[in-house]
Image: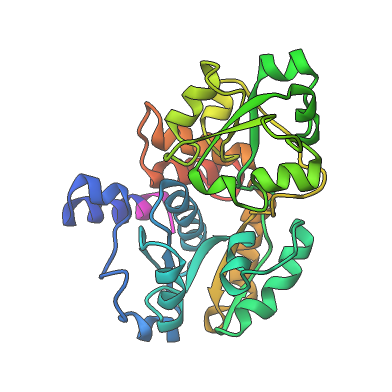
């Protein structure tokens, strides 16, 4: 689809719905309905997304790239969690969605032990195949939990990896309330990296915003010395923060990966989506989120189109 055609589709969305809804993606029906089954059986591609900006941006990237190659594409964004998106894939309400490999595997197997990108990707085909779904190539881009410190803290204490935090003891750590019990949280620090083995060496400070502004502010102003912040947070660059390496793969891979219904698969579709995965990096996701969620307030559609063009995947 040409740039003019893409703009026409976006204009139609703006006419049909309010500005706020338009920025969230122009849906043709209730995303949780069972409609769209007929489209799933034909050539139409219905791209869905989770209900957060990064997923919508990725959905726009998939949709626009496929449109440019002549596919018939519509979108149903901001659907909700996997408890809604997986059924939507099963009933044909959508038939393609950007996913995260580790969390997707966890949906099918809560006791999964795979941690590296290669191992998680290898386990996914059988897991999702039970629902007549399949995955394509994963991207280098990851959105996952990370142990983060300020640049000054890292330099003053020679911190490069999570295990180095032992040199920082005692310290305070900010994260969501569940972090105190998760395998990659406080227990993992102790059992995998030997950090916080002795009582009182790590003080857990819960924050409800899951790596959001309050958590970031607590880290930046010194209320805590370490924080759990997602790797695609714009704050990583804005505040010049340091993501500590995880050489033991304590935190599972969370690479962006296309998940689709088997009945829409073609080699041509795979080529388009795999080309995106081959280009997309974590830094790209940070920049895209900053454009959409930061002061610019760019639409997901605009940010996606400009990234595709800069990546050489869309004609100017």
Answer with left or right where residue 193 lies relative to residue 4.
Answer: right
Question: Is 50 placed above or below 223 here?
Answer: below
- Residue depicted at x 32% and y 81%: 34
Q: Quadrant of the N terminus?
A: bottom left
The image position of residue 62, as x and y in percent, is 51, 58
Which residue is more in the foreground, 77 or 202? Answer: 202
* Overall secondary structure of the magenta section: helix
Question: Is 125 placed above or below 11 here?
Answer: below
**Where are the magenta residues, as a range?**
1-6
Query: In the image as oriented, which residue stretches furthest toward the front?
Result: 199
- Residue depicted at x 35% and y 33%: 297
Which residue is more in the foreground, 121 or 35? Answer: 121
Question: Is 126 placed above or below 176 here?
Answer: below
The image position of residue 60, as x and y in percent, is 44, 54
The number of discs equals 0
Question: Is 247 placed above or below 65 here?
Answer: above
Answer with left or right where residue 93 lies relative to residue 253.
Answer: left
Q: Quadrant of residue 136?
A: bottom right
Which residue is more in the foreground, 281 or 144? Answer: 144
- Residue depicted at x 46% and y 67%: 82
The image position of residue 64, as x and y in percent, is 46, 56
The image position of residue 126, as x and y in percent, is 69, 80
- Residue depicted at x 76% and y 42%: 246
Q: Is residue 42 visible?
A: no
């Amino acid at each position: 689809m040409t740039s003019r055609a893409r703009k026409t589709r976006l204009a139609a969305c703006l006419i049909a719905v309010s500005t706020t809804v338009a920025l969230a993606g122009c849906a043709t029906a209730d995303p949780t309905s069972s409609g769209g089954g007929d489209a799933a059986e034909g050539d139409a591609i219905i791209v869905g997304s989770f209900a957060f900006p990064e997923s919508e941006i990725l959905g726009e990237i998939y949709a626009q790239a496929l449109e440019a190659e002549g596919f018939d594409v519509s979108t149903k964004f901001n659907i909700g969690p996997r408890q809604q998106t997986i059924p939507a894939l099963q009933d044909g309400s959508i038939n393609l969605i950007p996913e995260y490999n580790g969390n997707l595997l966890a949906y099918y197997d809560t006791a999964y032990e795979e941690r590296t990108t290669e191992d998680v990707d290898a386990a996914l085909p059988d897991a999702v195949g039970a629902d007549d779904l399949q995955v394509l190539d994963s991207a280098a881009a990851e959105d996952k939990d990370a142990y983060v410190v300020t640049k000054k803290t890292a330099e003053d204490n020679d911190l490069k990896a999570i295990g180095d935090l032992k040199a920082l003891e005692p310290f305070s750590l900010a994260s969501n309330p569940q972090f105190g019990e998760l395998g990659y949280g406080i227990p993992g620090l102790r059992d995998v990296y030997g950090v916080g083995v002795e009582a009182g060496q790590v003080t857990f400070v819960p924050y409800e915003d899951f790596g959001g502004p309050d958590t970031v502010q607590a880290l930046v102003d010194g209320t805590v010395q370490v924080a759990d912040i997602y790797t695609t947070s714009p704050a990583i660059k804005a505040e010049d923060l340091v993501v500590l390496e995880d050489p033991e793969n304590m935190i599972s891979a969370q690479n962006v990966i296309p998940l689709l219904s088997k009945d829409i698969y073609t080699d041509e579709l795979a080529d388009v989506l795999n080309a995106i995965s081959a280009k997309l990096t974590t830094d790209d996701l940070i920049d895209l989120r900053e454009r959409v969620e930061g002061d610019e307030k760019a639409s997901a559609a605009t940010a996606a189109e400009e990234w595709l063009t800069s990546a050489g995947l869309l004609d100017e």
